[in-house]
Image: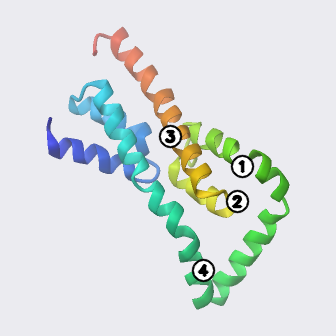
Amino acid sequence: MDIPAALTVVILGALPFFEARYAIPAAILYGFPPLTAFGLGIIGNLLPVIPLLLLLDPVSGWLRVRSQTMDRFFSWLFERTGRHEEQIRRYGAPALFLFVAMPIPVTGTWSGCAAAFVFRIRFREAFLAIAGGAFVAALITTLPLLGLMKLFGGA
């Protein structure tokens, strides 16, 4: 296995807006077998999830203490989202899964972590929903690519 290429794919998968959806096709272009490309892309895509889920709350607290503007912003944000507490409790993790699973711009794992933070979805539920959504989004983008490659003789 080409370690520098593999690390490049993992790093691309970890980047916001790029994520596994684009890292997997890049890995296939690097010459990785589709299953290896998929694994590298997903690993990279999930790398930032745990730190983001664990750090967004403490970082926002730190910002609130040090900036009146940030304190006002987070107060407004949580007051606004708190109005929908019942729906969030009922649909939070499943909605988060669907949000991350849609392979369109701004619906990846980074945005999913931000949504989990804003809507106060518990870590375990958020992680499982985001990981599942990332897996589905990666499948949705990879399977048609493999079909096209097979159709045009690239696989």
First-in-chain label (1 vs 2)? 1
First-in-chain label (1 vs 3)? 1
Distance (Cα) linking label 4 and label 1 = 22 Å
Type of the residue with mark 4: Gly
First-in-chain label (4 vs 3)? 4
Residue at x-position 47% and y-position 28%? 139
Q: State if disc 3 and disc 4 touch (CB < 8 Å).
A: no
First-in-chain label (2 vs 4)? 4
Type of the residue with mark 1: Gly
First-in-chain label (4 vs 1)? 4
- Percent x, y of residue 17: 47, 50
Question: 10 Å neighbourhood of mark 3: few (<14), some, or many (≥20)?
Answer: many
Nearer to me, 133 or 149: 133
Name the residue that disc number 2 marks. 119
- Percent x, y of residue 89: 77, 52
Q: Is residue 23 left or right of residue 122?
A: left
13 above or below 154? Answer: below
Q: Which mark is in front, 1 or 3?
A: 1
Q: State if disc 2 and disc 1 touch (CB < 8 Å).
A: yes
